[in-house]
């Protein structure tokens, strides 16, 4: 509840600042983004920090989830928000039902956020944590083909981010065509 109150206060502050600058259209767009972000405030990304790399997440349709995740990644490489949204919807379907607070529920929340927004930058933010969870799924699942854990050190203001790919060739979903080949293979699964 405290996080939601803070999120609402941030939304209100950002909206006021944008409106006071006389840029009403941008203010409306920013307010809508912030409201969507605030509506997902119950999704605790800090919980991901507690997940250990050796932990496993078992899914009934793990291969379906991985395939849908790879479609999301490809759509973000192409900076295509609509395709990312559609692929994330497939991921939500593949994941099915989940207990509230479980890792699967966290995956669903990130995927659903990607479905709900058409802003590729916000989609990419949620793709980052989605990737961390799908990595745990991939580590604990028999896969049809090899996967490659890739890393871009420049993503998110040089804090770096990982993603999974079905190809050794780096195609960066965090920058798209701006820095398509920025990254390296860190692990083969």
Image (cartoon, rainbow, N blue to C red):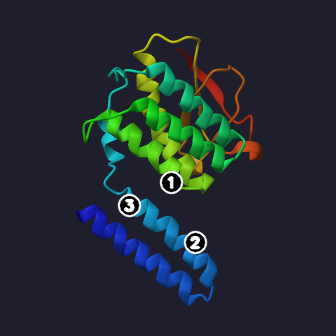
Left or right: 179 with respect to 106?
Answer: right
Please provide percent x and percent y for residue 44: 32, 48
Q: Residue at x 76, y 44 (%)?
A: 177
**Cβ–Cβ below 8 Å for labels 3 and 1?**
no
Q: Nearer the viewer, residue 174 or 102?
A: 102
Please provide percent x and percent y for residue 110: 44, 44
Left or right: 48 with respect to 117?
Answer: left
Please state, as top left, top right, bottom left or bottom right, where the N terminus lies in the image: bottom left
Total labels: the figure holds 3
Within-10-Å neighbours for mark 1: few <14, some 14–19, many 20+ = some
Within-10-Å neighbours for mark 2: few <14, some 14–19, many 20+ = few
How far apart, in angstroms, are the residues tagged by discs 3 and 2? 15 Å
Q: Is residue 50 visible?
A: yes
Q: Nearer the viewer, residue 141 or 96?
A: 96
- Specify which label sits upstream in the sequence, 3 or 2: 2
Q: Is residue 14 above or below residue 102?
A: below
- Specify which label sits upstream in the sequence, 3 or 1: 3
Please name which of the two marks, 3 or 1, marks the residue nearer to the observer. Answer: 1
Which numbered dot is residue 43? Answer: none
How far apart, in angstroms, are the residues tagged by discs 1 and 2? 14 Å
Q: Which residue is mark 1?
A: 116
Q: Is residue 152 visible?
A: no
Please provide percent x and percent y for residue 134: 46, 29
Which structural element holds mark 2?
Answer: helix
How far apart, in angstroms, are the residues tagged by discs 3 and 1? 11 Å
Which structural element holds mark 1?
Answer: helix
Which numbered dot is residue 39? Answer: 3
Q: Which residue is mark 2?
A: 29
Which structural element holds mark 3?
Answer: helix
Please provide percent x and percent y for residue 187: 55, 18
Please name which of the two marks, 1 or 2, marks the residue nearer to the observer. Answer: 1
Q: Is residue 59 above or below residue 23?
A: above
């Amino acid at each position: 509840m405290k996080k939601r109150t803070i999120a609402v206060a941030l939304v209100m502050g950002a909206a006021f600042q944008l409106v006071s600058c006389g840029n009403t259209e941008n203010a409306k767009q920013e307010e809508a983004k912030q409201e969507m972000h605030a509506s997902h405030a119950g999704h605790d990304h800090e919980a991901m920090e507690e997940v250990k790399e050796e932990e496993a997440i078992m899914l009934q349709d793990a291969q379906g989830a991985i395939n849908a995740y790879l479609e999301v990644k490809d759509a973000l490489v192409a900076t295509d928000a609509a395709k990312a949204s559609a692929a994330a919807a497939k991921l939500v379907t593949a994941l099915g039902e989940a207990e509230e607070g479980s890792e699967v529920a966290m995956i669903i929340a990130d995927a659903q956020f990607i479905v709900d927004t058409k802003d590729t930058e916000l989609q990419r933010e949620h793709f980052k944590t989605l990737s961390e969870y799908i990595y745990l799924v991939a580590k604990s699942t028999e896969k049809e083909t090899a996967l490659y854990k890739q890393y871009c050190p420049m993503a998110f203001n040089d804090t770096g981010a990982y993603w999974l790919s079905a190809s050794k060739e780096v195609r960066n979903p965090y920058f798209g065509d701006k820095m398509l080949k920025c990254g390296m293979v860190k692990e083969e699964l």
